[in-house]
Image (cartoon, rainbow, N blue to C red):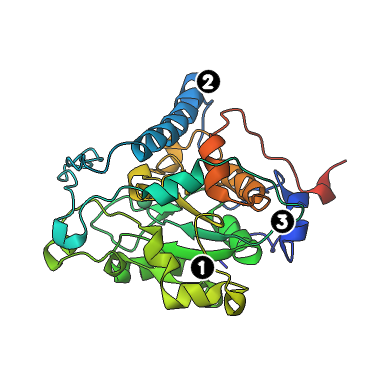
Amino acid sequence: MAQGVPPPPSVPAGPAKMIATANSFTPVSAQPTPKGRKSKHALRKAAAAAAAASHANGQQSQTSSKNNTPRPSSTPQGGRDERVPPSSASGGIPDPSPLYLARAFAPPATLADPRRILVILDLNGTLLFRPTRKQPTQFVERPHARRFLAYCLDSFHLAVWSSARPENVQHMLAQLLTSEQRQRCVVIWGRDRFGLSQDDYDSRVQCYKRLSAMWNHPDVRASHPHASRGGRWDQSNTVLVDDSPEKGRSEPHNILPIPEFSGLENEQVDVLPQVHDYLNTLCYQADISRYMHQNPFTLDPNYQLRPPPSQEA
Ligand SMILES: [Mg+2]
């Protein structure tokens, strides 16, 4: 861990203790915070963006799979070209299967006891960002990123999936996780895990995180705690945290979309602590896709971190 980071929190050993820490996420004091008063308008805008992204994603799930009209989802950044849709050789643009939707649209149910779910985290724009392409190994961390990652590792099954090239994934993780923490991840996947053609791999294409690809991978299957008894990861127990809702297009009710992190000056409200609380809620759900279909993640513009229970009066 880097200097200045406080000692590890009293992270629960398992899901049974998770709820005790919900909404008690403590900030990492080493992280600089934006100066100046946050305007309420800006906060509302950030919350509305998260809600709109979630809603739009839900709408996409109900569109016909016949409509595969390319729809670039990103605006040019820093003069870069817009993303282009992947070629058919790379699988094209996916849509959710009727079976997936039928299952996700059923009523949710709550479990008596929480369970360890599979959390898949994006990197760039979610946990950190790279200010300049000229310095490819320099990143700015989203507030609370390391503490959030440590919590995920201790409380869930954690996988990392980024559309960055594998070497850049390693650079990003070298800043965020120790080697011991990296070894505890279920898998760490980069751009080579999207089934892209060579042309698409080398182009600025829209990547799609088909969760079925992860669910069906032998290493991921083996990581399920009840794999030997037929237990497996699927839409009932998996969540993808990503700043790009489009990436979760094939399983739109398993993606937790968050605003893109583009620098401390643009971070209007604590995001990762709110994700932390929502993940804890998902641990009590019999089917995550059903719950998220009816209760998509929304950002609270008035969110305030509470001190850990030990520091409360
Ligand atoms: Mg991203």
How dense is the environment of label 2, judged by Cα within 10 Å: few (below 14), some, or many (20 and up)?
Answer: few
Image location (x, y in percent) of residue 146: 55, 59
Q: Are marks 3 and 1 in contact (CB under 8 Å)?
A: no
Residue 199 vertical position relative to residue 288 in the rendered view, above or below = below
| Residue 177, numbered circle | 1
How dense is the environment of label 1, judged by Cα within 10 Å: few (below 14), some, or many (20 and up)?
Answer: some
Q: Which residue is mark 3?
A: 114
Give how far apart the Cα atoms at labels 2 and 3 are.
35 Å
What secondary structure is found at the residue carrying circle 2? helix
Mark 1 lies within 8 Å of ligand 1 (Cβ measured): no
What secondary structure is found at the residue carrying circle 3? loop
Q: Residue at x 35, y 47 (%)?
A: 249
Q: Which quadrant of the rendered structure holds the C terminus?
A: top right
Residue 53 vertical position relative to residue 100 in the rendered view, above or below = above
| Residue 190, numbered circle | none
Q: Residue at x 43, y 50 (%)?
A: 100
Say whether residue 223 is visible.
Answer: yes
Mark 3 vs 1, N-terminal side? 3
Q: Residue at x 54, y 34 (%)?
A: 299
What secondary structure is found at the residue carrying circle 1? loop
- Amino acid at circle 2: Lys
The image quadrant of residue 261 is top left
